[in-house]
Image (cartoon, grey):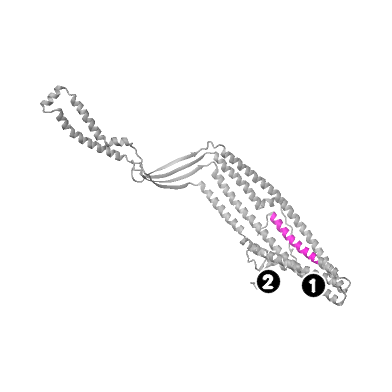
Amino acid sequence: MNRFLGMMVLLAGAFVPVAAQRLLNLDSCRSLALRNNKQLQVSKVKQDVADNLRRSARTKYLPHVSALGGYMHTSRELSILSDSQKEQLKGLGTTTATGLGAELGQTLGALPPATLAALGQMGLSLEGISQMVMPGLGNLATTLNGAGQQIVDAFRTDTRDVWAGSVMVTQPVFMGGSIIALNKLADLNEQFSRNSADAQLQSTLYTVDQAYWMVVSLTHKKRLAEAYLDLVEKLSSDVNKMIREGVATRSEGLSVEVKVNEAQMQVTKVNDGLSLSRMYLCQLCGLPLDDQVVLAEENVQDLLTDESVLSYNVQEAIDNRPEMHMLQNAVDMSRQVTRILKAGHLPQVALMGGYTVTNPNLFNSFEKKFGGMWNIGVLVRVPIWNWGDVAYKVRASKGATTIARLNMDEAREKMELQISQGQFRVNEAYKKLEMARTNITRAEENLRTANLGFEEGVIQSTTVMEAQTAWLQAQSQKIDAEIDVKLSQVNLKKALGTLAY
């Protein structure tokens, strides 16, 4: 129906300059407001964030691969041999030759006289034998000293410059249920973001509907105020003529002029309120604040074209509310947090494997080139004692879950009350509208008879002003009742969670 009325207004305003006015109906205002609302855009971004967090949680089931590399320079190298051992090896030949020389001297000195006599007959003496052996011992010492130095050099590690790298693969096997709980938490967070977006959408529609009907109400009241001003101005003109004819007093004229001033003031107030309301509606719709917006219902005499009564089930309506879904998500998320904390009490098992390289490597002594090896293993972590830290956290998390559940129960009661109040207000609005329509008929007839009596000269101007005031109040009450019906219906739909575009 709103779209039909909007098309009628568009056709009726075909000759209005496009630059001067912008013709809108309720659906078009809703559409503009939904595109312009920044909080809805924030909700969409939050949904993207929640989706990425859910995808991230899924990766916890899969093996993770990491690489590590590094270089280190030290001021000293590692040494397998001590300083004393190095000195002993470097003097190995000298030590050996000295020992052999001393042993040879002792051996020769201990020879029996007969042996010495036999050596003498052969032309050998102890001194000669020593002179013959000593060069050989010198050569042996030099050779052994060189061999000792070679051993010392071979035991050098040269570890002042060390390169190392590793590639590791880790596959969780059992994490105490924390990964499963984390994924469920991510799913609930995604649902929460969607429900939050639905709640924000309904809030936006509720706000723009209120602003729309406020503009419509003030537009009709402006037209009513102008009509009332015309009535009192005509009455003022008639009274002034009567004053000039001498059939009315100056006091009557002043009373009518006061009414004219009041009517002018009322027109001014309505115009100011209408300008501010249009600016607010333009801001909600993302339009320039000075746009001349014309709404579809501004030229409709009977605003209430749909008087159907909403049918609903209270419990189903509450269960369908996005706010209730958000509260349920909060309870479920708190439970998953508790499960994650409980996992801190349980053992954790993971498979590990990788490849490690170093330079220098130890596979062929301290060889100055890269060398590596494969490795595989199992990592088991078993919590033993943490002074009750995890237990305290679990208790605190359970308390948070209880709070969330109580908040949800309280919200359910408030929503039930909100729905009942919304239905009551709709019924009251219909009753007020019916009474306002009855008053309109009476006020119009009263004004008509007052005008006839005034023209006939049998009724004073004060009676006419009273009839005009009663007519103004009746017309204003009718507009308020029609708008009240529209707003009460919007309130009820929001309470039922059925306010959607």
| Side of 436 relative to 18 (left or right) | right
Q: Which residue is mark 1?
A: 233
Q: Which residue is mark 2?
A: 11
Tell which circle, 1 or 2, labels the residue nearer the N-terminal end: 2
Quarter holding the N terminus? bottom right
Q: Main secondary structure of the magenta part?
A: helix
Amino acid under disc 1? Glu
Q: Is residue 501 above or below residue 20?
A: above
Give coordinates of residue 294: x percent, y percent. 68, 68
Res. 445 in view: no
Which residue range is magenta in the image? 471-495
Query: Residue 14's quadrant in the figure?
Result: bottom right
Q: Is residue 36 above or below residue 121?
A: below
Q: Residues within 10 Å of mark 2 (few under 14, many from 20)?
A: few
State the image quarter where residue 498 is shown. bottom right
Residue found 50% across the figure and 42% down from its top? 173
Residue at image point 55% right, 43% down: 178
**The C terminus is located in which quarter?**
bottom right
Residue mark closest to the camera, 1 vs 2: 1
Q: Is residue 181 left or right of residue 68?
A: right
Q: Nearer the viewer, residue 122 or 297?
A: 122
* Residue 213 colored in magenta in the image: no
